[in-house]
């Protein structure tokens, strides 16, 4: 839930989710539509489907217990390098490099003297973090949390609080006068994108659930027919909505 979504938005949804589905077995028994509905407006709703699929896999492959082994975690639907390392480190106190956007920014500044990390994760960043990570697994897990919190609370993207930073005596970026990032960055837009159209269509289906929605309701969600059709087709292809035999649509 926290991938690309701020904690403040996630917290209420996370609490409601765990109250409703406190175990992988409970989640696995839900329908995909239940998961999409409970996901609400968190965004990137395919994550809801993957989370449910991961719960099904945990029940089928691991007797309902989330595995501790990083390779078994990686094999679960929707679980990539970051999530597997985070679960293995934070929950099971193993030694793994956990590189989220906050940690990557902190290390880019302290070690590389750059304002921001590269746009996608590099092997150099992995090696740099692995070299810094304490050898003791418990200390490594604490180090991961500390680096993440430093990035989230002190070394923020746009307003780092360097005077009160606990590592300001060893920060290359600060020592070299905080040179500005020279890499052209893509600015993520939302208004007018297919993502926005998908969000509108899915919101109409959530609002009507458990009832289906006739095509005319979806037509009213977005004026531009070609873009609306493209968004609808992609939601169908992703399994986030289902087409009914009588031409309506519903959550799966
Ligand atoms: S000194 Fe400033 S830029 Fe360097 S790690 Fe601390 S907050 Fe970030």
Image (cartoon, rainbow, N blue to C red):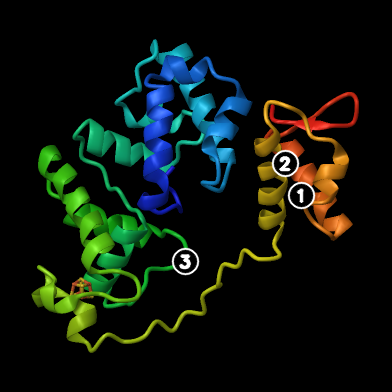
- Tag in front: 3 or 1: 1
* Dot 3 crowding, Cα within 10 Å, few <14, some 14–19, many 20+: few
User: At 83% from the left edge and 26% from the top edge, which residue is drawn?
Assistant: 244
| Residue 173 location, quadrant | bottom left
Q: CA distance from mark 2 to mark 3?
A: 27 Å
Query: Of residues 217 and 137, which is closer to you in this image?
Result: 217
- Say which mark, if any, is on residue 235: 2
Is residue 136 visible in the rendered structure shown here? no
Q: Earlier in the sequence, mark 3 or mark 1?
A: 3
Above or below residue 33? Residue 153 is below
Quadrant location of the N terminus in the rendered image? top left
User: At 41% from the left edge and 32% from the top edge, which residue is drawn?
Assistant: 16
Residue corresponding to mark 1: 231
In terms of secondary structure, where does tag 1 sit? helix
Indicate the position of residue 251 as horizontal and vertical percent values: 69, 30
Say if mark 2 contacts mark 1, CB within 8 Å: yes
Quadrant location of the C terminus in the rendered image? top right
């Amino acid at each position: 839930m926290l991938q690309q979504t701020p904690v403040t938005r996630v917290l209420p949804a996370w609490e409601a989710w765990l109250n409703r589905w406190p175990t992988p077995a409970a989640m696995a028994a839900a329908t995909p539509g239940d998961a999409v509905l409970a996901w609400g407006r968190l965004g990137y709703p395919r994550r809801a489907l993957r989370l449910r699929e991961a719960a099904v896999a945990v029940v089928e492959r691991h007797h309902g217990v989330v595995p501790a082994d990083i390779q078994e975690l990686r094999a679960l639907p929707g679980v990539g390098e970051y999530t597997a390392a985070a679960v293995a480190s934070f929950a099971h106190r193993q030694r793994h490099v956990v590189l989220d956007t906050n940690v990557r920014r902190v290390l880019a500044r302290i070690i590389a003297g750059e304002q921001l990390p590269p746009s996608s994760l590099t092997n150099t960043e992995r090696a740099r973090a692995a070299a810094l990570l304490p050898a003791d697994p418990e200390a490594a897990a604490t180090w991961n949390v500390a680096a993440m919190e430093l990035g989230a609370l002190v070394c923020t993207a746009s307003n780092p609080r360097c005077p009160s930073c606990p590592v300001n005596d060893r920060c290359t970026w600060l020592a070299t006068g905080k040179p500005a990032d020279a890499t052209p960055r893509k600015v993520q837009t939302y208004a007018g994108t297919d993502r926005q159209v998908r969000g509108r269509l899915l919101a109409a289906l959530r609002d009507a659930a458990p009832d289906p929605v006739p095509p005319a309701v979806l037509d009213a969600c977005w004026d531009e027919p070609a873009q609306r059709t493209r968004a609808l087709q992609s939601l169908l292809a992703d399994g986030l909505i289902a087409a009914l035999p009588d031409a309506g649509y519903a959550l799966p």
